[in-house]
Image: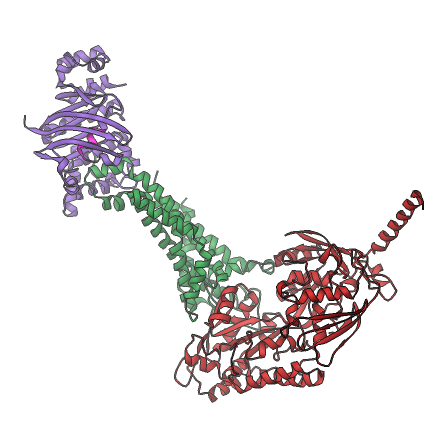
Chain colours: A purple, B red, C green
């Protein structure tokens, strides 16, 4: 598989040294890589570091991020900005907090579109409507005029995902995108990710603390513990033969029935993923 | 004397003194606007201190506020020398200060020395400082003293109205007084309690010791609204100086308690800036220096309307520099400038001004517009200015009223001279020409329209200078009056000050008060405080 | 509350219409002194009576409303815009920008304004038309009022900057200026609107009080402030209920604006 992203990163915060220690992995084009780890192990740091937005949280990263043959660490801020949202999308954990409460949905989507494309209002509207139908949302005016507070959490997450894939990025960073959702919605969203990845040949770095939901859509799984990748392998292999003690503990915590079903079908159905990952 | 009889005697003494000091005249209550800054009579410089000094001080002689005559008090007689430098007094004998210290000529000498002590900067003493050198006091006998000043002083005896005699020996210093009351308790910001002086020397016609009142309580109250409300509620007995606006309210709510004693000495006046060094345009200065222009403005102002509307009739159109309230000095040949719009326009036409489409232009085509500065926050003056605006617009003049906070106003009229016309009121504390010297001499600081002239810039100012000096150096009242009449005449013709109105002395007096006889000189109501009583029985005796 | 809204619209419409038509419906000039009838009670000729110089109160109310209703909101708008810009930029950029701007705000709050206003008056020429004087006063008020509000806005902007939606917008490739003006600013809007509405009555009264410094509206021009100032003092409250009409109108107008504002507020 052709390599899209290849990184080797260390990161720290002002008051917290060595959050990431030489984290190294690779994502192929169209591949979904699951990244699991306990809370506070540096998963979110990683997604911000890739977007070079870590300074917003008063952090800094060193190392290299090779993306489409360029080292992002060497790019100027303006070049980085052209990349964000266009080539690399981001979906955050809490959909309602991630949408601007003061802007109508239509306005926010238009903003996201205009950040990279100079086009007529019609083209913009057309792109938005198309994207909304891709993420199975209504695209009528009534819906576009809504404020985030007038939507359900599931709808809001779809809007966010839609916004992240509006420009058909090569890479989507999904940072715990389903942990704020109820099980049914969660499974729908997982299916949407798998779907989008296939449709647009889009790579996804799927970050979660929940191994089962990761397993449901990932080709490979990387396990992050204490700032380091402790294991990185095919999903089935991780389940069948976990190497690291932390991975083993993770696998052991999954109900047996769910595990059996997984063993039979690497790309698990949404139903089982949903059932298994409910907490 | 055995100890028992001594106790008895002191008991009797106690009864006698308490009986003597309990006159039954009650307690008089009124308000001071702010705390007195000093109780030292020599250092008095503010109105509340002056009022306390008036009530507590003993004076050699005093101007009767009602008759405007100088009357003997601690001095039974006095004589001013021909050269006007020396005054000799014969003093009353057997008097004691409020603390019991005996009074003698030494106290007068002590007071005069303190008064003239340059290091104390006594504002009262300023009236006596006519030349360099020291004052000389000569105690001729315990009841005789003469005081000699370095240079002659016009109406020397009049100035003693402000000089409260202090004790040279009393350990209580300035708190030992010769007046009808002494300060017994003072709480800053709250009140001042004055008790009757048991050693006060004056007696009424029936031989009864004055004052009738037992005590006076002065509340410190800065807010005039509150003061009026307290009067209407009966909490205080008098308001010494009532605004016309409040006066009509007092009249409607408590018929009979408002007193209008008639026109006061105080004028409201307008003047134009004629100072050559002022930063105003030359063509404007030319207007202001024109007598015709000034008199025309005077005639164009409807002063009767101002008296009627702003003062609700409690004022009258002013005649000139002196108010008719100054009975002796007022020049009775003068009458008020008539309100005459056509006459004003005629005078202006003589100077080349012309009225076009309701606007007045000077001969060079400048629109006649000027600003009038006045103290901000003074409702009366702001109203007067607004009325002037309308009056002047009728002869095509645009008047811009500029209310300024008081310090800025003083800065402009005394230092930067950056103003065009000014409206201010004057409080005249004394009668006659003495206090007018530092206004009318062209070299004077208070020669407002053009102060501190090295040489008089106009013939009429030169003549006023000469006349003012003549009257000041003369000891003959007739000659002085003649000269000062002429000064009033010139001031009336030249109009450096445009006098608008003289207000009336308005006061509110509780019907419970007896013997109150409000006057037009301050203090209006309690100038005879030793005879005021709250008990009809005590007063009528 | 449709009926409240309708009443509010009615009050405002009538007030604005009356202001616009002040010239035609006013029975007399606001400056004209009817000297034969000062302090008159309401009559056929003088609907609200006359003031102490005999000027028609109704005409003065119309003119005063016109001035205050035009200038006070303008000053409030100016002050809100300044507070939004300065506070927004400070909170958004943080760091030394915030420190410098907030120090400036503290400085403005701590300055002895009394003396500065006196200086301002001293610098103004003496012959200023009444209209210019009142306009300058409101301009000064507008330029000075921002500091306290800017601090609040700054705190708001700071938290908005750290919010998830800002991060999301940045991750979408949004630039800094665009983020500030298109994403953060709309969230500050309720704060600024509140500031705007609070400022209007404050400025109306402040203008009246500046009169004692020689600033503010000068005779013969009326403003709401100067009309309200007549109500202070003992004599004003004696049996002349019609003099309170300006006060009632002020309350009615401010309340009406607020009713409409609440109606417009974002659903939450």
Q: Nearer the viewer, residue B302 or B32?
A: B32
Instruction: Give residue B500's position: percent from left, percent from top.
Output: 58, 76
| A261 relative to C46, above or below | above
Residue A156 rendering spot, x and y as whole percentages: 25, 33
User: Quadrant where the N terminus of chain C lies?
Assistant: top left
Q: Nearer the viewer, residue B273 or B371?
A: B273
* Residue that extends furthest to the bottom in the rendered view of this protein: B350
Residue B482 position within the rendered picture, expressed as x and y whole percent measured from the top left: 67, 86
Q: Is residue B172 visible?
A: yes
How would you classify the magenta stretch by its main secondary structure?
helix
* Magenta-drawn stretch contains B55: no
Pick whichever, B478 or C129, lies toward us: B478
| Residue B523 visible here | no
Which residue is at the far left?
A: A1
Reply above or below: C252 against A173. Answer: below
Q: Taking B448 as reference, is B256 left or right?
A: right
Q: Is residue B100 above or below residue C262?
A: below
Res A177 quadrant in image: top left
Residue B11 as seen in the image, left or right of residue A200: right
Query: What residue is rendered at 73% in x and 67% in y?
Result: B518
The answer to which quarter of the image holds residue C237 is: bottom right
At a point 52% along the width and 77% down the height, the residue shown is B452
Residue at image point 13% right, 37% down: A74
Region in magenta: A45-52
Taking B14 as reference, is B299 left or right? Answer: left
């Amino acid at each position: 598989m052709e390599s899209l992203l290849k990184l080797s990163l260390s990161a720290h915060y002002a008051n917290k040294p060595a959050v990431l220690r030489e984290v190294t992995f690779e994502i192929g084009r169209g591949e979904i890589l699951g990244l699991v780890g306990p809370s506070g192990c540096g998963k979110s740091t990683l997604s911000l570091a890739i977007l070079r937005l870590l300074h917003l949280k008063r952090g800094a990263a060193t190392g290299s991020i090779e993306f489409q043959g360029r080292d992002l660490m060497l790019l100027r801020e303006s070049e980085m900005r052209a990349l964000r949202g266009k080539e690399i999308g981001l979906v955050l954990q809490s959909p309602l907090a991630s949408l601007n409460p003061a802007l109508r949905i239509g306005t926010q989507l238009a903003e996201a579109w205009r950040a990279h494309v100079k086009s007529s209002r019609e083209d913009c509207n057309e792109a938005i409507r198309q994207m909304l139908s891709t993420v199975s949302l209504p695209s009528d005016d009534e819906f576009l005029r809504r404020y985030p507070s007038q939507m359900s959490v599931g709808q809001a997450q779809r809007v966010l995902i839609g916004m992240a894939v509006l420009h058909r990025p090569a890479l989507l960073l999904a940072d715990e995108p389903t942990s704020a959702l109820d099980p049914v919605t969660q499974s729908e969203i997982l299916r949407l990710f798998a779907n989008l990845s296939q449709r647009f040949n889009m790579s996804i770095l799927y970050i979660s603390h929940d191994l089962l939901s990761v397993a449901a859509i990932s080709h490979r799984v990387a396990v992050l513990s204490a700032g380091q990748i402790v294991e990185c392998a095919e999903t089935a292999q991780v389940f069948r033969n976990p190497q690291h003690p932390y991975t083993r503990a993770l696998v052991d915590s999954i109900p047996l029935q769910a595990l059996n079903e997984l063993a039979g079908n690497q790309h698990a159905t949404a139903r089982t993923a949903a059932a298994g990952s409910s907490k | 004397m055995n100890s028992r009889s001594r106790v008895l005697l002191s008991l009797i003494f106690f009864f006698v003194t308490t009986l003597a000091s309990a006159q039954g005249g009650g307690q008089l209550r009124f308000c001071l606007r702010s705390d007195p800054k000093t109780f030292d009579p020599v250092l008095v410089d503010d109105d509340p201190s002056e009022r306390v000094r008036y009530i507590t001080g003993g004076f050699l002689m005093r101007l009767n506020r009602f008759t405007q005559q100088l009357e003997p008090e601690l001095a039974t007689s006095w004589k001013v020398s021909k050269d006007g430098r020396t005054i000799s007094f014969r003093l009353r004998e057997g008097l004691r200060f409020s603390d019991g210290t005996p009074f003698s000529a030494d106290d007068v000498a002590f007071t005069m020395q303190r008064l003239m002590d340059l290091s104390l900067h006594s504002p009262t003493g300023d009236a006596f400082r006519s030349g360099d050198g020291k004052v000389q006091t000569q105690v001729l006998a315990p009841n005789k003293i003469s005081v000699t000043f370095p240079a002659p002083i016009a109406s020397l005896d009049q100035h003693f109205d402000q000089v409260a005699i202090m004790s040279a020996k009393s350990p209580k210093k300035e708190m030992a007084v010769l007046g009808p009351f002494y300060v017994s308790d003072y709480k800053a910001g709250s009140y001042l309690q004055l008790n009757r002086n048991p050693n006060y020397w004056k007696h009424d016609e029936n031989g009864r010791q004055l004052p009738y009142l037992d005590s006076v309580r002065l509340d410190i109250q800065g807010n005039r609204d509150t003061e009026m409300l307290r009067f209407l509620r009966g909490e205080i007995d008098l308001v010494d100086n009532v605004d016309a606006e409040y006066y009509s309210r007092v009249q409607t709510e408590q018929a009979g308690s408002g007193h209008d004693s008639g026109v006061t000495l105080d004028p409201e006046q307008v003047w134009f800036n004629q100072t050559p060094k002022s930063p105003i345009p030359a063509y404007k200065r030319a207007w202001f220096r024109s007598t015709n222009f000034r008199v025309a403005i005077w005639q164009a102002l409807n002063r009767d309307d101002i008296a009627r509307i702003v003062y609700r009739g409690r004022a009258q159109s002013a005649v000139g520099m002196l108010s008719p309230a100054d009975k002796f000095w007022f020049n009775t040949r003068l009458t008020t400038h008539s309100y005459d719009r056509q006459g004003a326009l005629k005078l202006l036409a003589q100077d080349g001004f012309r009225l076009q489409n309701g606007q007045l232009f000077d001969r060079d085509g400048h629109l006649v517009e000027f600003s009038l500065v006045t103290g901000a926050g003074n409702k009366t003056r702001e109203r007067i200015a607004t009325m002037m605006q309308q009056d002047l617009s009728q002869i095509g003049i645009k008047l811009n009223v500029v209310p300024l906070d008081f310090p800025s106003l003083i800065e402009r009229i005394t230092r930067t001279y950056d103003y065009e016309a000014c409206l201010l009121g004057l409080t005249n504390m004394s009668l006659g020409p003495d206090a007018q010297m530092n206004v009318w001499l062209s070299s004077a600081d208070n020669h407002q329209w053009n102060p501190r002239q090295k040489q008089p810039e106009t013939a009429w100012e030169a003549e006023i200078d000469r006349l003012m000096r003549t009257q000041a150096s003369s000891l003959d009242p007739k000659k002085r009056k003649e000269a000062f009449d002429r000064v009033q005449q010139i001031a009336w013709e030249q109009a450096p000050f445009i006098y608008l109105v003289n207000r009336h002395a308005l006061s509110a007096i509780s019907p419970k008060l007896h013997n109150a006889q409000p006057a037009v000189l301050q203090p209006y109501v309690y100038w005879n405080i030793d005879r005021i009583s709250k008990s009809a029985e005590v007063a009528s005796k | 509350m449709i009926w409240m809204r309708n009443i509010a619209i009615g009050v405002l419409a009538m007030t604005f219409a009356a202001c616009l038509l002040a010239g035609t419906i006013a029975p007399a000039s606001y400056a004209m002194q009817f000297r034969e009838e000062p302090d008159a009670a309401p009559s056929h000729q003088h609907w609200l009576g006359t003031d102490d110089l005999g000027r028609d109160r109704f005409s003065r109310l119309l003119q005063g409303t016109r001035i205050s209703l035009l200038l006070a909101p303008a000053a409030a708008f100016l002050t809100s815009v300044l507070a939004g810009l300065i506070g927004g930029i400070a909170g958004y950029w943080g760091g030394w920008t915030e420190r410098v701007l907030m120090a400036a705000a503290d400085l403005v709050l701590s300055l002895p304004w009394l003396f500065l206003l006196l200086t301002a008056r001293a610098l103004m020429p003496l012959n200023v038309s009444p209209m210019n004087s009142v306009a300058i006063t409101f301009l000064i008020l507008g330029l000075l009022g921002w500091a306290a509000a800017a601090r609040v806005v700054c705190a708001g902007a700071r938290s908005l900057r750290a919010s998830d939606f800002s991060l999301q917008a940045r991750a979408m490739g949004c630039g800094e200026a665009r983020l500030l003006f298109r994403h953060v600013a709309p969230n500050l809007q309720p704060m600024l609107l509140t500031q705007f509405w609070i400022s209007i009555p404050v400025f109306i009264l402040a203008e009246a009080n500046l009169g004692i410094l020689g600033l503010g509206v000068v005779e013969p021009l009326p403003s709401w402030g100067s009309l309200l100032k007549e109500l202070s003092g003992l004599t004003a409250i004696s049996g002349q209920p019609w003099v309170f009409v300006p006060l009632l109108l002020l309350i009615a107008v401010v309340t009406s604006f607020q009713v409409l504002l609440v109606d417009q507020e974002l659903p939450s």
